[in-house]
Image: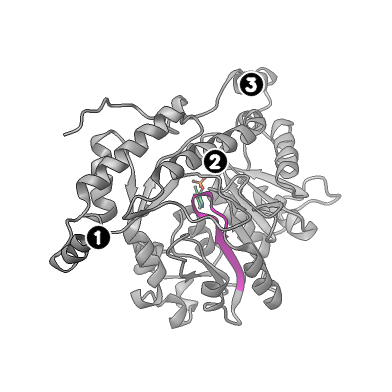
Amino acid sequence: MTDFKLLTLPSDQDASGRTFGPEEIQNVTDVLRSGVLTSTKGNYVKEFETQFAKKVGAKHGFACSHGSAAVHVAIAAIDPQPGDEIITTSITDMGGLSPIIYQGAIPVFADVDPKTFNVTAKTIAARITDRTKAIIVTHLFGNPCEMGPIMELANSKNIPVIEDCAQAFLTAQGDRYVGTFGAIGCFSLQQGKHITTGEGGIVVTDDEALARRCFLFINKAWGYGDKNPDHYFLALNYRMSELLGAVALAQLPKLDGVVDSRVRSAAALTSQLRGISGIETPHISDGSVHTFWKYCLLVDERVITGGAVGLGAKLKERGIASAPRYIQKPAFKCEVFRDQRTFGNSRFPFTLARPEAVDYSEDKFPGTFEALKNILVLPWNERYTQEHVDYIADAIRDGVAALTKTPTTTNTLEAAVV
Ligand SMILES: *Cc1c(COP(=O)(O)O)cnc(C)c1O
């Protein structure tokens, strides 16, 4: 048994792993003193929208209450007919999926690449039909989807793409940030995201007509500023309050530093883990910038006893709370999809679905099942130092060493020859 001292890692669930300072306190105090807590009258949310859009390179930004709300706003802006299909991914947060159903559309799951956990042009193409109204791509863990081929495919079919960038702030491909490839980009400001207001979200777009619908959907579709305003269509109040806008605006200038720190510490871990047999470090394509919402390893259970679960248990002994399988099971295995539990007993909108669109047979999702079997998600944040990275690397090395299977009879011979 090796001796080790337990180190407590900074956590994104409290101040230890977050970047709050006097700037946030100052802004929040300013809002409270002013007594203007609604964004319909105040300036913090408006200023955050303007600056965030500029930062990612989009024309318009509209803040809202949650990342889930951001996805809902994007879908409502595209305005599907009931029963229209929206292609999405089988590995994501439920907040990226339930808005599809709320807008009466059918979520059609595309398989993922088992190495990057992202949908690809190929897996999307396999699900496109004449009922496809939109495609949602999720840049999982902060690693970008291959947007070149995806946009080529979508443009050739004239299908709008929504980018779920909740985990992908300043994630880039070539010279562009994600969120600006498709028609609309959606971000979350939830407690554990790159920058945070506890709960919150924002959408960005370059398209004037979509921008108008995003604004309206966040505002009960009330035509603020119009000559004869009305509630133009069915919509909710998804506004962000000025208190959160105040925090968001103070967080924004810190985003570059947050991302740099995450990228740097992740690269340090990757270089320490290189060459360890039985695990794979994140697959990042040329020209892509992965901004590490989480650091995800692939664990080969043929080499390591117990695979991702076994290694996760070893890390837990060192106080490292990893998540084998990330979401435990593909989204479509959750009861809401499996049993079509939606509005009362209606099963709406699934009652309108083509049978193939809701066929969740495992053999349709080989990449998804392979990925989830092998994924080990390490918590990550901008406050990790070299000491933390060394600690995690040591724990992984020791865990792998303890769990590496002894060669079987067939390859004992090989080993003996070597
Ligand atoms: C966090 C997240 C959401 C939902 O955001 P909330 O702010 O929690 O509502 C949606 N999609 C993805 C990929 C996420 O990670």
**Who is closer to the viewer here, 157 or 190?**
157
Mark sitting earlier along the chain (2/3): 3
Label 3 secondary element:
helix
Q: Residue furthest front?
A: 417
Residue 418: give its label: 1
Which quarter of the picture shows residue 146?
bottom right
Q: Residues within 10 Å of mark 3 (few under 14, many from 20)?
A: some
Say whether marks 2 and 1 touch (CB < 8 Å): no
Task: Name the image colouring.
Answer: one colour
The answer as to whether callout 3 falls within 8 Å of ligand 1 is no
**Do the CB atoms of the residues marked 1 and 3 lie less than 8 Å apart?**
no
Residue 336 x %, y %: 38, 63
Q: CA distance from mark 1 to mark 3?
A: 61 Å
Vertical side of 11 occupied by 125: above or below = below
Task: Kindly identify which residue carries mark 2.
Answer: 263
- Residue bearing mark 3: 23
Judged by depth in the image, the label closer to the viewer, 2 or 1, is: 1
Amino acid type at image mark 1: Val
- The x and y percentages for residue 60 are 75, 48
Amino acid type, mark 3:
Glu
Q: For the point 61% across and 48% down, which residue is it?
A: 171
Residue 222 vs 32, above or below: the answer is: below
Residue 376 coordinates in the image, percent (x, y) = 35, 50
**Mark 1 neighbour density, 10 Å: few (under 14) some (14–19) many (20 or more):** few
